[in-house]
Image: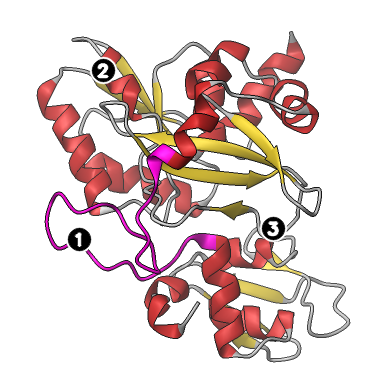
Amino acid sequence: MTMEKIDLQRLRDLPIEGVAERLGLQVVRHKALCPFHDDHHASLSFSVRRNTYRCFACGAHGGTIDLAMKLLGKDFLDACRWLAEGSNVMHVTPPTTPLSPRRGAGGEAFCASRYGQYFEHPFLNEAARKFLFEERRLDPRVILWCRLTSWQDRQGVNWLQIPYYSQDGRLIGIQNRNLIKGALPRFRFPSGSECGIYNLPVLNRLREGDELWITEGCSDCWAMLSAGHKAIAVPSATLLSRKDIEKLTIVNSHLSITFHMYPDQDAPGERLFMQLKQVLPSLVHHQLPQGCKDFSDYYLSCKQAI
C-alpha cells in the first residue's frame, strides 16, 4: 500500500477514541491510563472536538496517526498503513463513467461473482454460532435474512463474513469481522467493497405508515431486527457519507414513515442523531437505559431478563 493510495485526511479524521480502543486502551469518559509512562490515574485525556489526545502528566500529545506511531513503535508510513488497513480508509479514484465497475485502492473492481457463491448457502462455524446465538442471542431467522457466513484464515482466526447488498439485491461489498475479542485488525474489507448503509433490501418491504429504525453498525441492526423491527444501519457516527444521506432523503420523500433511533450512549452517537434529524424531521429519539452503551447491550439485557 503506497502513500498515494491512503487518504491522509480521513485517517486524521478517524475518531481518536476509536483508534485508542483499537490500540488496546480502555477509554472511559474521554480518559484512559497513559501507556507512555507508569500511570495509575487515567491522565491521558481525549478531545472529541479536536480529535486529539494529551497526557497531562508526561506531555504526550497528538492526533490519530501520532498515537498509532508512538504506541506501535512504527514510522509515519507504517502507522498510516496500519490505520488504513483496519479502517477501510483508502483513496479511491471515482469511476470514469456511471457504468464503470466499483474499484478499490489498487484499481481492482469488487468482484461480486467471486464472493456471491459464499452467501448462496451460508455456513456458520462453531465460533460464529457462539458469537451470534450464545453471546448475542440473535434470532436465527435474522441471520438467515442477512446471509451471514463464516470462514477461517490460514492462521486459524475465525471471521464472520457480512454481505452488503444494494436495495435491488446486488452484492456490493463485504465486511469481515474478527471473532477474537479485542484482536486486531477488527475488520477487513475486500477491495472495492461499498459498505455504506447496511440492510438496504428491507426498504422494499416498507409500506405507508411503517416505522424504520436506524442503528449504528451491523450488530445493532441484527439486534433491532431480532426485536421484531424493520431496521437499517449506518456505518458509524463518523462515516455517514453524502450518498447515504441522499438515500435516506429519497426514502423519506417517497413514503410517509416514521424513523426511530436509539443513539449510542456517547457524544458521537448523539451527534449522529442530530445530523440525521436535519434530513429526517420525523426521526424520533429513544433513550437507552443506564448501563447500556448501545442497542445491542439493551437487547441483550432484555433477553437475559426473560
Image quarter (top left, top right, bottom left or bottom right) of the C terminus = top right
Residue 214 inside the magenta-drawn segment? no
The disc placed on residue 204 is 2
Which of labels 1 and 3 is toward the front?
A: 1
Q: Residue at x 18, y 10 (%)?
A: 208
Q: Residues within 10 Å of mark 3 (few under 14, many from 20)?
A: few
Amino acid at pointer 3: Val
x and y, in percent, of residue 67 in the image: 63, 80
Q: Which residue is mark 1?
A: 95
- Give whichever of discs 2 and 3 has the lower sequence position: 3
Q: Distance between the Cα atoms at labels 2 and 3?
A: 40 Å
Residue 177 position by quadrant: top right
Q: Distance between the Cα atoms at labels 2 and 1?
A: 27 Å
The disc placed on residue 26 is none
Secondary element type, mark 3: loop
Q: Which residue is mark 3?
A: 28
x and y, in percent, of residue 21 in the image: 67, 61
Q: Residues within 10 Å of mark 1 (few under 14, many from 20)?
A: few
Q: Are marks 2 and 1 in contact (CB under 8 Å)?
A: no
Q: Nearer the viewer, residue 30 or 111?
A: 111
Specify start and end residues of the magenta stretch as a single range.
Answer: 87-113
Magenta segment's dominant SS is: loop
Q: Nearer the viewer, residue 120 or 130?
A: 120
- Give whichever of discs 2 and 1 has the lower sequence position: 1
Amino acid at pointer 1: Pro
Q: Is residue 224 above or below residue 141?
A: below
x and y, in percent, of residue 8 in the image: 41, 79
